Image (cartoon, rainbow, N blue to C red):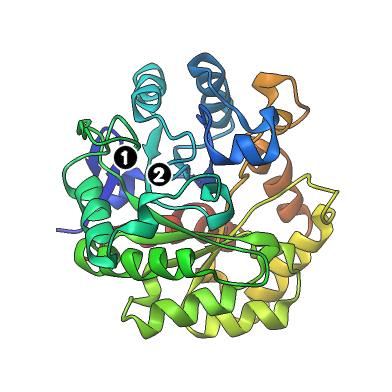
Amino acid sequence: MAFIRTIHGDINAKEMGVTNTHEHLIRIGGGEVALHGEDMRLPFVDKAVEEVKRFQAAGGKTIVDCNPIGVGRDIVKLLEVNEQVPDVNLIVTTGFHYSQVYDRTVHWVVRYSVEEIADLLIAEIEEGIDEHDYMGPIVKRSKAKAGCIKVGTSYGMITPFEEKEIKAAAIAAKETGAVINTHTTHGTMALEQVQWFLKLGVNPEQILIGHVQRIPDAWYHKKIAALGASFSYDGGYRVKYWPDRFRVELIQEMIKAGYQKHITLSTDSGKKSYQKAYGAGTGVDYDLVEFVPRLREEGVSESALEDILVNNPARLFTLKK
């Protein structure tokens, strides 16, 4: 039976609803905080609850928290968030970020074999996420199981560490049917990620590439979509990169080219300065309250929006066993 694996159990795809496919609600520390500063630390359950409730009030039903192993993931706090907003589905993540966030230590990924790493990912999907975040010798499985696998790659390259995580993620994806939900640094190496996964035998329906809107070149996106992979277009309101116009035009062009079924939306609000609960001007509800209304004004059809917000995420996050 096909199902979607959430933090509180397995659900039918029809229960998915409007979905944010790449978000960060809790990050208690780790390599990103060490690398990029305290703006990256999101430690408070009450503030995560506030963001989730805003998303819900705007019509949202499911949030994918993409914080992976070893970068401040805290499944106990995420369970507390879910208990306070039980009507919103939370999908949580196993897997890894790009190698730079782990470079301050000799991470166990360096020491373990690909097969051993894959076994640890599979266990988080089938048995439960480690309450200690795989950061020590004792493993304590929580009741929450991972519903997707994360992979990250560096700017303009895929490091040996990242090659190892890609291979382990491919094994885990084929074994469990879970989608691989990726990080690309400034959109680079997106095509290479897809090529790697296809070479390793991953179903293209299990490949969801993140942050590629940072390269708002429709030609590049069409090449990736032609291989069967999908996109999580995020980063709204990030005028330091591109104004929203570029994301609108990219979506319009991809729909025109026949790739409406390959698009999802996310806010990736993984900093205090990106969340209203911490005092920012925007938050996890941004796409639903600002960007989707703009897409309507710009002529994107209701059928396309239904695919982008509901149907495509439900298909992609259904475990394909």
Q: Which mark is residue 69?
A: 2
Picture quarter with the N terminus: bottom left
- Nearer the observer, 313 or 188: 188
Q: Quadrant of residue 175?
A: bottom left
| Residue type beneath disc 2 | Ile
- Can you identify the residue that label 1 sits on? 134
**Label 1 with label 2: CB-CB less than 8 Å:** yes
Residue name at image x 75 percent, y 61 percent:
248
Instruction: Answer left or right for 175 relative to 35.
Output: left
Q: Quadrant of residue 135?
A: top left
Position above or below: 171 against 26: below
* Image location of residue 214, percent across then percent down: 73, 62
The residue tagged with tag 1: helix, strand or loop?
loop
* Image location of residue 144, percent across then percent down: 26, 35
- Nearer the observer, 10 or 169: 169
The residue tagged with tag 2: helix, strand or loop?
loop
| Residue type beneath disc 1 | Tyr
How many marks the image carries: the answer is 2
Instruction: Answer left or right for 57 relative to 75.
Output: right
Task: Give the mark nearest the N terminus, 1 or 2.
Answer: 2
